[in-house]
Image: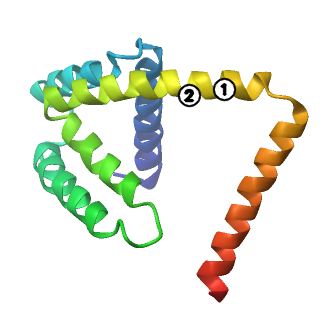
Amino acid sequence: MSWLENIKRAIEKAKDGWRHWRTFREIDAGHRYQARYHLHQRRTRKGLVWRYWRLFSLTCGPLLIIAGFIFIPTPGPSYIIIAVGLWLLAGEFLPLARLFDRVGVRLGRIGRAVKGVWRSSPATVKILVVLAFASLLADGVYTLFAG
């Protein structure tokens, strides 16, 4: 196989991934992860998924969750690591996909409420909030590097 064929195949895989992402975004909130679970199961039965993906998900998912909990006391993205581990498992377990859907709906409501409060706030309040976050960030960076 030539390098040109490899590039073409990589481009096709990227396009396919983009189509899956667009489909995921178009599905109503509250059903996205369940739809992803069912799509993943169908694609697995048809042989369109790497045959070791289930083993990979069932091994790496719990390992990432454990690593995330171990790293919670340290600075860094430990909660994101836990979420990625759960996301890997949500493709294999329908109850976990349902949980992701419920949490996603609730987070969406909270996000819309925060957005509404932000939009209705006066400019001075917005400036004070941004300055407070900037000072917290600066203090965190200072503590990390000089503290």
Disc tally is 2
Give the farthest residue toward the bottom. Answer: 146
In the rendered image, which quarter is residue 124 located in? Answer: top right
x then y, percent, for residue 89: 19, 41
Q: Determine which residue is flagged by label 2.
A: 111
x then y, percent, for residue 85: 26, 50
Judged left or right of residue 101, residue 43 is: left
* Residue 3 vertical position relative to residue 92 in the rendered view, above or below: below
Judged left or right of residue 54, residue 76 is: right
* Residue 75 vertical position relative to residue 122 in the rendered view, above or below: below
Badge 1 crowding class, 10 Å Cα cut-off, few under 14, some 14 to 19, many 20 or more, is few
Give the colouring mode of the picture: rainbow
Give, as a three-letter code, the residue at label 2: Gly
**Which of 37 and 13 lies nearest the eye of the viewer?**
37
Q: Quadrant of the C terminus?
A: bottom right
* Residue 69 vertical position relative to residue 19 in the rendered view, above or below: below
Q: Residue at x 85, y 44 (%)?
A: 127
Give, as a three-letter code, the residue at label 1: Lys
Badge 2 crowding class, 10 Å Cα cut-off, few under 14, some 14 to 19, many 20 or more, is few
Per the model, the C-alpha gap separating discs 2 and 1 is 6 Å
Q: Residue at x 23, y 24 (%)?
A: 98
Q: Residue at x 35, y 16 (%)?
A: 30
x then y, percent, for residue 14: 45, 37
Give the farthest residue toward the right. Answer: 124
In the rendered image, which quarter is residue 92 located in? Answer: top left
**Which of 23 and 123 lies nearest the eye of the viewer?**
123
* Residue 9 vertical position relative to residue 34 in the rendered view, above or below: below
Q: Residue at x 78, y 21 (%)?
A: 120
Q: Determine which residue is flagged by label 1.
A: 115
x then y, percent, for residue 32: 34, 20
The local secondary structure at tag 2 comes to helix
